[in-house]
Amino acid sequence: MKKIGLYANPFAGREGRELEGIPFQVSDISIYIPKAEHLIKDKLHEIKNDGIEILFIYGGDGTLHKFLTDWFNLFEEEIIRPIIIPLHGGTMNIAATAMGIPANSFYAVRKIVSLIEKDEEKFCYEVPLLKVTGSKSGNLYGLEVVLGLAANFLKEYEDGPKGLWQVARIFILSITTVLFGWPRKVRGFLKKLKCRLEIDGTEVKRQEFTVIYCSTIHRVIFGFRPFRDTHGLRGFRFLAYTISPLVIVARLLLLAFAILPKSDKYINSSAEEIRLTGLEGAIFTVDGDIYESGDSLKIEEGPKVQFFSFKKFN
């Protein structure tokens, strides 16, 4: 039987409510729970030294992103060796949802271990991460990188109370500000992002963007599919829109499913590398976690992860 491990963030959105019961779902599982941030690297060394082959990660998208970032910064590998399975344990679980992981972690652990033992190749996908350089926090690794309106929205959420009602509140305030100019306090995060953008070495003429979004996942939050089908996809999915917030509100459902008019205001394709310069400390997010850029950012295809998934998600 493969060596199985569980890495958990006890402070994630669900506050570890299922953690106590998960070990009882598998006969032999090693548990790795860092009690403080400075102990995370010790746990990663334990996972590697123990030769873990299947690793469940309990937490949200942020927990998965921080684990992968710490792992690749610590070990500098081209591919992570354990098969990674994100569980629904956080506020945002976009990765787990995209991979079809059941929301009930007890059931998910039992079922997935059984399936991997029977037919590993059928359910495991090797996926390149996004690597972000130029952040004031060092090199970052994740599945989604967002700048502009959506990143500002997430920062507004993180700065206040948590919960679905808060998401709804900020969303409604954003729409009323776009339509009626009220409340004024929300206007700040509706401003366009000013920067120079290069896509695979070619500079884009426009230098103001409402949203820039890079992803290795084609189905994102709420089941939206904002990226065009890119046959023969190279690198990662990528979009950059220069339309106004008013147009975003008016065409939100169309944009959510990549139903776009023909216009150079809508860049929606794939890329192997993008560079943004002149950012002057812009806010951006990696898998929902908020960071501040330096003057420039480079986003490129990074190291690979072998994920368990019930369906192809990238």
Image (spheres, grey):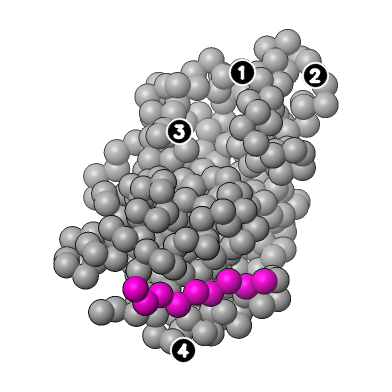
Label number found at residue 49:
4
The residues bearing labels 3 and 1 have C-alpha atoms spaced at a distance of 21 Å
Label 2, on which residue? 183
The residue drawn where x is 43% and y is 40% is 220
Residue at 75% across, 38% down: 161
* Dot placed on the residue nearer the N-terminal end, 2 or 3: 2
Q: Quadrant of residue 291?
A: bottom right
Q: Amino acid at mark 1?
A: Leu
Magenta residues, start to end: 27-35
**Against 258, is 99 above or below?**
below
Give the answer, above or below, for where 21 lies relative to 303.
above
**Label 3 element class:** helix
Q: Amino acid at mark 3?
A: Phe
Q: Pick whichever, 57 or 212, lies toward us.
A: 57
Which numbered tag is attached to residue 122?
none
- In this view, the residue in front, 125 or 110, is 110
First of labels 4, 2 by sequence position: 4
Question: Measured from the top left, where is residue 73 in percent x and y?
Answer: 56, 76
How crowded is the residue under tag 2: few (<14 C-alpha within 10 Å), some, or many (20+)?
few
